Image (tube, rainbow, N blue to C red):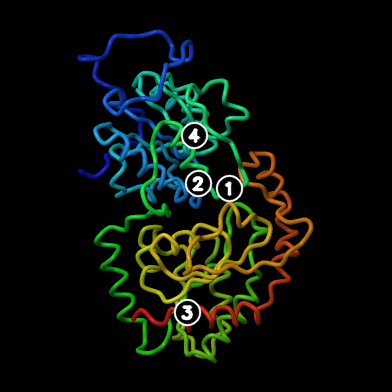
């Protein structure tokens, strides 16, 4: 399948050859699920943070398998679009630069007259609901269900991957096998990661990636000084080489962590220096990832790297990587979880107002000694890749 075409401005179909106009789709309910032959165009808005984008990828695969001949268009933010580049399920990738663009994209959707719209994110489901598509479903049926004509469940006590798949199932799409997040580094990204590993890895010594960040909800961050103690212990006990990954906001924490190493050459700070798919290519070559509940954790899980996830304010039922290669640590507290999935804009804004109160108490109670012991068990169990 050819690579998805990237569009940063609203795309309008050619005037010639348009299908006849019909009554607004929300005025009637189709009698049954769409048959693959009836769906020539499919719209799946994925307007969400990075981790949620990865959780939506199994649903995109299921939609592609159910509607193999349809042109599948995805709308993403400029911040998460990179994670969908190269995805074989996606034919066309639209990019919204900011929320101010959404009115334009809504008009574009209505002009395009999609056959099927499946919202695979909280915000994106509003566009799916009002897209004018013949069949419509998406997230948040408790609030948007009136505008859907393919009923989808809205259980929020399940894993985010399963939630998105349940929405896809409302359109008749079923996942095959064991669904897991997907990311597709480019060949250039993979070559870069191989070169980095050859230059940085030492024979017989583990290569461990750390991520100290958590952009949208800083309460999720394990303290940087705890990461520093962990990094120093892994270097001293295992001879590990450490690489810090993340975004520009994580660069300062990365420097502080690596400053704790006895030998500076044992650490590299790549936070804010490489893109998302290049980070994924690198994580595919490390022996262990240790980090908070944030996008790099889910990138590592997507490429099959053993992980050690540090959870606190968020619910592992929604976000924890699944499978035997993944372990999580948390401290049970009556107040947890205090950040709720799909909690909406107000919860996000409240989090940003209280950044000075982070990290959360449940994250402070996860000790470096406990994380070190579990990290060593992971290294012993899964061994070295290089």
Q: Which dot, 1 or 3, sits closer to the camera?
A: 1
**Vertical arrangement, residue 211 with respect to residue 91, above or below:** below
Q: What residue did someone put label 1 on? A: 158
Q: What residue did someone put label 2 on? A: 162
Who comes first in sequence, dot 4 or dot 1? Answer: 4
Say which quarter of the image contains residue 343. top right
Say few, some or many: other residues with alpha carbon within 10 Å of mark 1 (under 14 / 14 to 19 / 20 or more). some
Q: Which mark is residue 319?
A: none
Element type at marker 3?
Answer: strand
Q: What residue did someone put label 4 on? A: 124
Distance Cα–Cα, label 3 vs label 2: 33 Å
Distance Cα–Cα, label 3 vs label 4: 37 Å
Element type at marker 1?
Answer: loop
Q: What residue did someone put label 3 on? A: 242
Q: Which dot, 4 or 1, sits closer to the camera?
A: 1
Q: Residue at x 41, y 88 (%)?
A: 205
């Amino acid at each position: 399948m050819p690579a998805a075409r990237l569009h940063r401005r609203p795309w309008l179909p050619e005037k010639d050859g348009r299908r006849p106009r019909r009554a607004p789709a929300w005025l009637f309910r189709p009698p049954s699920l769409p048959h693959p032959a009836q769906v020539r165009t499919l719209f799946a808005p994925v307007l969400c943070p990075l981790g949620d984008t990865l959780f939506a990828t199994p649903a995109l695969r299921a939609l592609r398998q159910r509607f193999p001949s349809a042109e599948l268009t995805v709308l993403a933010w400029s911040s998460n679009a990179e994670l969908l580049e190269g995805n074989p399920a996606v034919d066309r990738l639209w990019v919204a630069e900011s929320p101010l663009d959404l009115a334009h994209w809504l008009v574009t959707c209505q002009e395009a007259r999609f056959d099927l719209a499946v919202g695979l994110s909280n915000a994106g489901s509003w566009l799916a609901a009002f897209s004018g598509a013949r069949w419509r479903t998406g997230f948040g049926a408790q609030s948007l269900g009136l505008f859907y004509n393919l009923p989808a469940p809205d259980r929020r006590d399940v894993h985010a991957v399963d939630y998105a798949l349940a929405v896809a199932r409302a359109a008749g799409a079923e996942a095959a096998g064991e669904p897991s997040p997907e990311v597709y580094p480019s060949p250039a990204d993979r070559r870069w990661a191989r070169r980095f590993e050859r230059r940085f890895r030492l024979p017989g010594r583990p290569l461990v990636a750390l991520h100290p960040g958590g952009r949208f909800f800083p309460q999720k961050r394990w303290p940087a000084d705890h990461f520093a103690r962990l990094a120093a212990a892994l270097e001293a006990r295992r001879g590990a080489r450490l690489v810090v990954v993340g975004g520009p906001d994580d660069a300062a924490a990365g420097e502080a962590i690596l400053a704790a190493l006895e030998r500076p050459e044992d650490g590299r700070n790549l936070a804010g220096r490489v893109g998302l798919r290049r980070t994924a290519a690198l994580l595919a070559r490390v022996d262990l990832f240790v980090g908070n509940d944030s996008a790099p954790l889910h990138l590592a899980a997507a490429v099959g790297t053993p992980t050690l996830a540090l959870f606190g304010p968020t619910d592992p039922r929604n976000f924890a990587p699944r499978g035997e290669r993944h372990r999580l640590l948390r401290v049970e507290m009556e107040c947890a979880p205090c950040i709720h999935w799909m909690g909406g804009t107000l919860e996000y804004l409240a989090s940003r107002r209280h950044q000075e109160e982070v990290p959360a108490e449940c994250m402070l109670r996860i000790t470096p000694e406990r994380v070190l012991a579990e990290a060593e068990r992971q290294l012993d169990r899964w061994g070295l890749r290089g």
